[in-house]
Image (cartoon, rainbow, N blue to C red):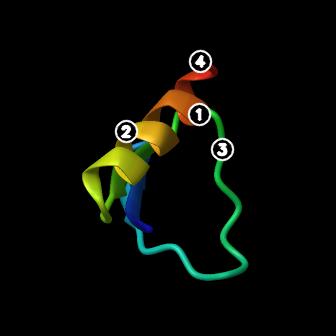
Amino acid sequence: MIVLARRDGEVIYPRGATVLKMGDHLTLMGPIESVHQMARRCRGR
């Protein structure tokens, strides 16, 4: 689960319609392997 995103110094609490952009910094919450998997996807690996 993405619990917040930081963009250009602003904190965004994502909702269903929130569009993520390249360069957003995400804070994730969930089972550790799921968080690692999402981090790999975000890095394109």
Q: Amino acid at mark 1?
A: Arg
Q: Nearer the viewer, residue 26 or 29?
A: 29
Q: Quadrant of residue 3?
A: bottom left
| N-terminal-most mark, 4 or 3 | 3
Rounded to the nearest angstrom, the CA distance separating label 2 from label 1 is 9 Å
Q: Which residue is mark 4?
A: 45
- Badge 4: how crowded within 10 Å, few (<14), some, or many (20+)? few
SS of the residue under disc 1: helix
Q: Which residue is mark 1?
A: 41
Rounded to the nearest angstrom, the CA distance separating label 2 from label 3 is 20 Å
Q: Amino acid at mark 2?
A: His
| Residue contact between numbered discs 4 and 1, judged by CB atoms under 8 Å | yes
The percent position of residue 37, horizontal first and vertical second, equals 47, 40
Q: Nearer the viewer, residue 44 or 31?
A: 31
**Rendered-image quadrant of the C terminus:** top right
Q: Which residue is mark 2?
A: 36
Q: Amino acid at mark 3?
A: Lys
| N-terminal-most mark, 2 or 1 | 2
SS of the residue under disc 2: helix
Rounded to the nearest angstrom, the CA distance separating label 3 from label 1 is 14 Å
The percent position of residue 14, horizontal first and vertical second, equals 52, 73
Mark 3 against mark 1, which lies toward the viewer? 1
Query: Where 30 sits versus 36, above or below?
Result: below
- Badge 1: how crowded within 10 Å, few (<14), some, or many (20+)? few
The dot on residue 21 is 3
